[in-house]
Amino acid sequence: PVNRSPEMQAERLKLPILSEEQVIMEAVAEHPIVIVCGETGSGKTTQVPQFLYEAGYSSDNSIIGVTEPRRVAAVAMSQRVAKEMNLSQRVVSYQIRYEGNVTEETRIKFMTDGVLLKEIQKDFLLLKYKVVILDEAHERSVYTDILIGLLSRIVTLRAKRHLPLKLLIMSATLRVEDFTQNPRLFATPPPVIKVESRQFPVTVHFNKRTPLEDYSGECFRKVCKIHRMLPAEKEDQKDSVEEVRKFKKSRARVKKAQAAVFKPPPEGTRLCVVATNVAETSLTIPGIKYVVDCGKVKKRHYDRVTGVSSFRVTWVSQASADQRAGRAGRTEPGHCYRLYSSAVFGDFEQFPPPEITRRPVEDLILQMKALNIEKVINFPFPTPPSVESLIAAEELLIALGALQAPRKAERVKQLQTSRLSCPITELGKTMATFPVAPRYAKMLALSRQHGCLSYAITIVAAMTVRELFEELDRPAASEEELAKLKGRRARVAQVKRIWAGQGASLKLGDLMVLLGAVGACEFAGCSPQFCEANGLRYKAMMEVRRLRGQLTTAVNAVCPEAGLFVDPKMQPPSESQVTYLRQIVTAGLGDHLARRVQSEDLLDDKWRNAYKTPLLDDPVFIHPSSVLFRELPEFVVYQEIVETTKMYMKGISTVEAQ
Ligand code: ADP
Ligand code: MG
C-alpha cells in the first residue's frame, strides 16, 4: 500500500495516464511486451512505475527497472517518484555512470540505458528484475535501440525458464512501426496503448517566403511582433509587458533554468522561452500559447567513411515540427508561427533518422561482442546501422587488437557477403570494461607499465569529456566584446603554452595541455575561480574529475596490483614517461595519423602548412587552438577532425618518424 499525501494524489489524478491504469495493467498481465505512447507530460515516466509497484511487480525482492537516455532524467525522476509515493530514496533509487543510491531495499530503480547494458553483460537474464521499462524510446538513442533488441531475446529466454520478464517500451510519439512492424525483433507485434492527452487546437501559420539566412533574427522579430500585436492574457492585466525573460539557447542553461520555467510568470508579464530541440520531448513547460518555429536543428554530422565530423544546421523533420507546434496547445488553444513556407515544409523528411544510423558504432560493436554476439549483422536492431559503418567499426576494433583478425582470404569473403563475424579477444574483453571509446580503452589497457596509468586515465578522461576550454572563437557583438575576447584568447594561449612545457613534454602536444590543465585545476581544488581565470569550463572539469574516479575504479578492478587512487596533487610525468605516453596515445589513435605535406609537393597554395591523411584527399590543418599550431611537426596523431571553414585536426600529439 502506498501512502501518498492528499495533495500529491490530487495532482496525479489530473494526469491523462491515470485513466488508462487499468488498460495498461491488463495489457502487461496478458502480454510479455507492451508499448505505451503518450505525449510528453501525460504522466508515463512518473506514473507507470507506480502502477507496476502497486500491482506487485516488485514483490519477492525483485526490482522494477526504468531506463532513461539522460543522466539528469534518471536522477530527477527517481526523486520525483519517491516524493510522490512518500517513499525513501533507499526504495526508489537511481544509478548513473558515476553514482547511485541503490540499496538492498530498492524496488524501483531509474538508470541510464548504458547502465542496464552493463548489467546485461554481468547477468544476461537480468534475473533481479520482474519488469524493465525502456523510457523515451522515440528518441531512438543508440543504447535504447540496442536494449530493445537484447530484451526481445531476454524476454523469450526468461519465458522458457518460467521466470517471466515484462518489457514496457514508452514513447512520446506514435511512431513505433520500427518496433511493431519488425518481425525479426518481435515475431508477434506487441500491443500499443495510446494515452490520449488533452490537446487543444493549434492554428499553424506559415510564412509566405522562407528567409535564407539569419533565422534567429527572424525569430526575434516575430516574437516582438506577436508580443506587440496580441492581447494580454487576462482582462485585468494592463499592457505593461516589460519583462521578457529569456533563456539562453544552450542545453545546459535550459536545464539550469528549468526550475524557473515551471513557475508561473509574474502578473502582467509574458513568459518567453527560447528553447532548443530538448524542448521537443523531455520537458513539460506549462502555459505556452504561441510557438515560433525557425524549422532548424543543429546536429553533429559524421562522415561514414572518414569519421570527419561537422556541425550542420538543417531543416527539422515534419514530425519534429509538429511536436514543436503541439507545445502551444497544452493548456488552451494556441498558435504556431512557422518561419518557412508550406512548400518547404512539404519537402522536410517525415521523421528524424535514428542516432544509430548517424554516428560511428565501434563502441557499440565492442559492447555487443563482449556479450558474445559475434554476428552483429544478424542482431535484431530496430533500425540497423549501415553496413559501411559496421565494417568501419570492425576494422578499427581489429586494428586495436580488440577483435581477432581473420585470415585474409576469410576476411575478403566476409566483406563480400557482409557476414562479419570476428570474435572478441582477451584484450577486447578488458577494453569493454572501461566506459570510454575503444581507442581510449586501448590506451588504458596499455598503460600499466612505467607508472603511466594515472596519467593515461587523466588524458583519457579529458579527451572523453571534450571541450575543456571555453569557446573563444565565437563572433563578437561589439568592438568592446571583441577586445575582451582577444584578451582572453591571448591569456588562454599563454596558459596552454605553460602547461605544454618545452622539449620532450611539448611533443605530447595538446594532450600534455590536457594533463597540465587537469593537474593544475585539481591542485587548486577545482574551484570555479580557477576555471574562470584560465579559460576552463567548470562543468567540464567536474565531469573530468568524476570520470577519473570512475576509470580509476575500473582499472583497479582489472589490475588490482596497481593500487591506483586519484591524486589531487599529481606530479608532472618524467621525460621518459612522456615518451611512453606518446607511444600509448599513438597506439590508440594509430589510424588518425597525418603527415605534413613536403615542400616539394607544394604545387598549390591550398597545401600551405597542410597535412595529408590516409583517408582524405583534401588537406587537413592543425587547429589554431592547438599548442602545435606553430610547431608544425612532420608526423602527428589527432583526436578528431572537425570541419568548419577548413578541415581541422584537434587534440594533437607528435609522432616520431620511423
Ligand atoms: P511523461 O513521462 O509522459 O512526459 P511525466 O511523468 O514526466 O510525463 O510528468 C507528468 C507530470 O508530472 C507533468 O505534468 C510534469 O510537469 C510533472 N512533473 C514531473 N517531474 C516533476 C517535478 N520534479 N516537479 C514537479 N512536477 C513534475
Ligand atoms: Mg517521460
Image (cartoon, rainbow, N blue to C red):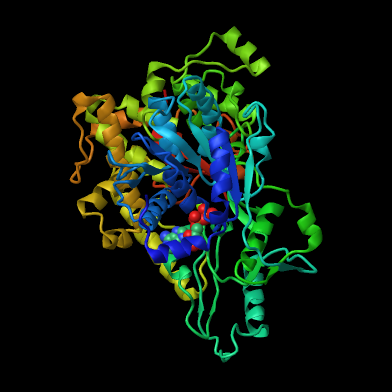
Residue lying at 31% horizontally and 34% vertically, measured from the top left: 456
Q: Residue 521's x, y, as percent?
A: 26, 52
Nearest to the observer: residue 606 or residue 371? 371
Residue sitting at the far front: 1
Evaluate whether residue 503 shows in this view: no
Nearest to the observer: residue 307 or residue 300? 300
Q: Is residue 37 left or right of residue 126?
A: right
Q: Is residue 9 left or right of residue 421?
A: left
Evaluate whether residue 180 shows in this view: yes
Q: Quadrant of residue 449?
A: top left
Q: Is residue 271 left or right of residue 339?
A: left
Residue lying at 52% horizontally and 72% vertically, measured from the top left: 477
Nearest to the observer: residue 174 or residue 48? 48
Residue lying at 61% horizontally and 21% vertically, measured from the top left: 378
Asked if 205 appears above or below 77 in the picture, the reply is below
In what quadrant of the picture does the C terminus appear? top left
Q: Residue 151's x, y, as percent?
A: 52, 30
Asked if 129 appears above or below 532 in the picture, the reply is above
Q: Residue 349's x, y, as percent?
A: 73, 48
Q: Residue 252's x, y, as percent?
A: 44, 59
Asked if 374 appears above or below 595 in the picture, the reply is above
